[in-house]
Image (cartoon, grey):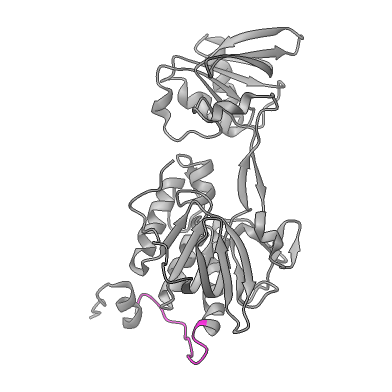
Amino acid sequence: MTVNPAIPQAVAAAGGPIEADAVIVGAGPVALFQVFELGLLEIKAHVIDSLTQVGGQPIELYPDKPIYDIPAVPVCTGKELTDSLMKQAEPFKPTFHLGQEVSKVAKREDGRFDLETSAGTKFITKTVFIAAGVGAFQPRKPKVEGLTQFENNGQLAYRVRDPQQYAGKNVVILGGGDSALDWALNLQPIAESVTLIHRRDEFRAAPASVAKMKALADAHEMMHITGQVTGFEAEDGVLKEVKVTSLDGVTRRLPLDNLLAFFGLSPRLGPIAEWGLDIERRQVKVDTEKFETSIPGIFAVGDINTYPGKKKLILSGFHEAALAAFGAAKYIFPEKKVSLQYTTTSTKLHEVLGVESPVFD
């Protein structure tokens, strides 16, 4: 997948490391709101993400599914939430470094941090914000030897980017959770055929989705097989069919054009685990005043952090980002007193946001 050209990308610094006030690791909803909260304090952010697009979990896992618990937004999709957060952060002109992972963080003698990415991008930054969700996601893959080779030609995939690419195709979907059921139902009207394969009769999906799938199967408008893929046949590097062994022990051959596997995603902390932070159960421990980690100048917000009473909600992450921004200000502006101002009435914030101050009668 190519990087979105509408997102401001960094140009490699020929003269050495990029000097920054704040580097945010992650580009999900909380990271994007962190850009906004830092921007209100006139702190410019650089954002790094291993994915090649912004949006984090909502874009990767449910871009078209509704979200109901964003304050003052009765309902929005993951994509709509991401688009709104990007628009909100736009006045502060963040710079994105996508498709790369932070590989090194080291404290300097002057209190700042040396930070380097897998792409060789180097920073010297005053503060670091970890907003990496639950870590870098890796899809759980089918345990059939040799099957993953078809990731290269796109026949095997773990998410749906464009439903229309499956129009007129024979699609086999593996899994029994919400993602598997949702895409089986969404692709059924446009694909030539849809077959759902799950290893047992029980599903982990919404009962209404399961009922609708079974009704379509009973009407012969799609097929449902209880079993597992145990092999495949290919010709000239093209996947032609999978071998499905059902609960009765019978193995059948199933022709297909595309295979979608929804076994869930396995999060991993990756290099963050090597930074020397205080970590508990693969989450970074923080205080609840500034959401600062055990290393001064490094903050953690969103699902990546843990503290007494922690709730993994986007709402909670937004609150954490606001307090973390104020906590970071002392490192970025050590001689400056940073006061709380309100976007409704502060002419200074209106200037920072690039909007006109309202006139009240």
- 74 above or below 295? above
Residue 277, quarter of the rendered image: bottom right
Q: How many marks?
A: 0
Chief secondary structure of the magenta portion:
loop
Residue 32 picture location, percent across and down: 46, 61
Give how far across and how far down residue 301 sits, in percent: 59, 64
Q: Where is residue 164 shown, x and y percent of the image? A: 39, 27
| Residue at the outermost front position | 15
Q: Is residue 307 left or right of residue 357?
A: right
Residue 155 point in image, percent of width and height: 51, 24
Query: Viewer-proximal residue, 16 or 160?
Result: 16
Relative vertical location of residue 49 with respect to residue 324 in this rendering, above or below:
above
Asked if residue 339 lies in the magenta stretch, the reply is yes
> Is 112 in the magenta?
no
Q: Give the residue drawn at x 76%, y 9%.
A: 248
Q: Nearer the viewer, residue 67 or 142?
A: 142
> Magenta segment, which residues?
332-344
Decide which of 309, 34 is in the foreground and name it.
34
